[in-house]
Image (tube, rainbow, N blue to C red):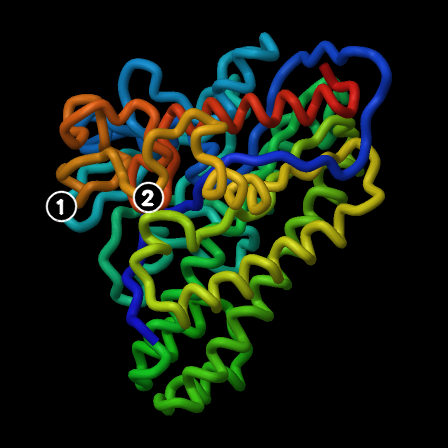
Amino acid sequence: MTRLKSLLTGLAAAAVLAACGGGDDKVEFGSMVSFGDSLSDVGTYKVGTVAALGGGKFTVNGAGGKVWTEFLSESLGTPAQCAARTGMLPNNGVTGAAVQDIAACNNYAQGSSRVSSSGTGPNGVALQAYGQQNLGFMADSLKDQMDRHLAKAGGQYTGRELVTVNAGGNDLFMQLNGLGAAAGGGAAAAAGATIAGWPQSVVDTVALGGSAATNAAAGAAVTAMGQAGGELAAYVKTLVVAKGAKYVVVRNLADVDVTPFGLSLDAGTRGLITSMTQAFNAQLKAGLDGTAGVILFDDYAQSADIVAHPAKYGFSNITAQNCGPNDFGGSSLVCTTGNLIAGDTSTYAFADSVHPTPYAHKKEAESVLDLMASVGWR
């Protein structure tokens, strides 16, 4: 199995698919509340070095550099999206800032966030306990994000919010990191397995290295992704819907195999990514089926349609990234209109190896609006 290095976050693409919920009259939303990872992050890490470099979002920063939740909010006329928590702990030569909560802001999404509080994502500060240098991201889990909003909102939603939820990409990347370390065995492999959240029996097997370790890791990774999908569905039902939210859009995982990162991998790894993604999506859907007020936005189906029909969505390139070299190795976090590759890349699908461009985010928001209209929400 090819060794895979830690990524900054995320996942990519755009979508379309309804689950359940709806009504006959147009809904007048009072606000938007967003939970998720880098795909929905509107500036959690726009501090210190990142801010000085003109970055802060995981896309092309600068004029028009919005993510899908911002485009969605603009279309619905709700208050502008802003980060509910900011900060970044200094590490690896990067200047950060103390954690700060902004009471007026309701976008809780953070780059590197995973579904569960039991594990951190790529570049999450918790990885420093394992001796891994990283960018010091907070990477608050989806559960932590939802709990924080409930604490701020007095334990209840008003029922007039549009709630958006996305996660799972960083769970997948941390599974890949564990898989990449497994064949080598030893302490590094055991640490990777522990961070991925695998059972102790698998951790012990992985520590021995070799083919048995690789096989055990592959099975554990698929199982863990299914569990994460079911866990996210449970959080949506217990920490969002049961607390009064009536309008919730949940995204499943897009096909990582069609990103520039995915296209760079060997066939075996790509096949395993497919199995992990399908396990997550299946359990997420099964857990949400029949939940009133929840619609499922199918990134996986949409990403396949984009690959088959890019012109339908207006994409000029769906296989390369438009961010050029920058201080963070080409990461979209500090990608700006001033450091793109040469030529007109305004309708590229990907900013970096996994994150969408503002154009792709806009197309995704349009698809969400169509989905909402189909169930009577607008």
- In depth, the one of 151 and 268 nearer the eye is 268
Q: Give the residue at x 29% y 40%.
A: 352
Residue type pointed to by label 2: Thr
Q: Where is residue 70 in the image (x, y as percent from the top left)?
A: 48, 20
Q: Where is residue 300 in the image (x, y as percent from the top left)?
A: 56, 46
Residue type pointed to by label 1: Gly
State whether residue 185 is above or below residue 232: below
Q: Distance between the residues labelled 2 and 1?
A: 32 Å
Callout 2 secondary element: strand
Camera-nearest label, 2 or 1: 2
State whether residue 246 is above or below residue 194: above
Query: Which mark is drawn over residue 200?
Result: none
Res. 150 image quadrant? top right
Q: Mark 2 points at which residue?
A: 319
Q: Mark 1 points at which residue?
A: 93
The reply, left or right, for residue 288 in relation to residue 319 is right
Residue 125 in view of the camera: no
Q: Give the residue at x 36% y 51%.
A: 124
